[in-house]
Amino acid sequence: MKKERILLILIGVILCIMIILTFLSVFKKDKEEEVSEITPFEEITEEEERQTMITLYYVNTETNTLMPEARVIDAKDLLENPYKTLVQELLAIPRNEKLKSALPEGVKVNDAVLEGNVATIDLSKEFIENQQNDNSKITLSVYAIVNTLTELNEVKFVKILVDNEEKQFFDENGNILDSLLTRFS
């Protein structure tokens, strides 16, 4: 009786081990099939491979607030001076018809440098002159630049110069904006 009982237990254990091994082999086979390599239908060109997504901030013409617009550009354009390139992209016409550039016409980007986590942007005098000292427009322009540049991980603060001179900017309520600007949410 005792021998029969031990034999039944032993057969039960062997059956359990066989079931577990069968399950594991099926599961492993499914995993191997999932890892199969996918071949693209079309070859990707070198130019397409260099494409990168950037986020630019423009003014919504309906709400007069900043809105992001994603744009795909050639990453090669960002190699020399990405900060200057991004601000220059803000001068371009947005793709969305409900958006417009926050920067005034005629403004030029003289220079842009990164020191630590501060991007310093030097703009031409048209940045102030072509906004007729309208603090509301200047605030939108300033934060279009700040929000665009702080999309980059390395940029935490932005300093804006006009013809290589520090200027005080005022918000629409007449309050002085900090010289080291942070992202406006």
Image (cartoon, rainbow, N blue to C red):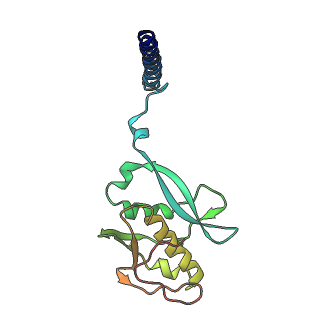
95, above or below 129, in the image:
above
Q: Farthest residue toward the front? A: 1
Give whichever of 105, 29 is nearer the camera.
Answer: 29
Counting from the top left corner in percent of width and height, residue 177 is at 48, 84
For image coordinates 52% across by 86% down, the residue present is 170
Counting from the top left corner in percent of width and height, residue 121 is at 38, 72
Residue 102 falls in image quadrant: bottom right
125, above or below 18, in the image:
below
For image coordinates 39% across by 70% down, the residue present is 156
Counting from the top left corner in percent of width and height, residue 25 is at 43, 18
Q: Farthest residue toward the left? A: 115
For image coordinates 52% across by 71% down, the residue present is 103
Counting from the top left corner in percent of width and height, residue 73 is at 45, 50
Give whichever of 9, 59 is nearer the camera.
Answer: 9
134, above or below 69, in the image:
below
For image coordinates 59% across by 55% down, the residue present is 95
55, above or below 184, in the image:
above
Q: How many marks?
A: 0
Q: Is residue 76 left or right of residue 92?
A: left
Query: The C terminus is located in which quarter?
Result: bottom right
Give whichever of 159, 74 is nearer the camera.
Answer: 159
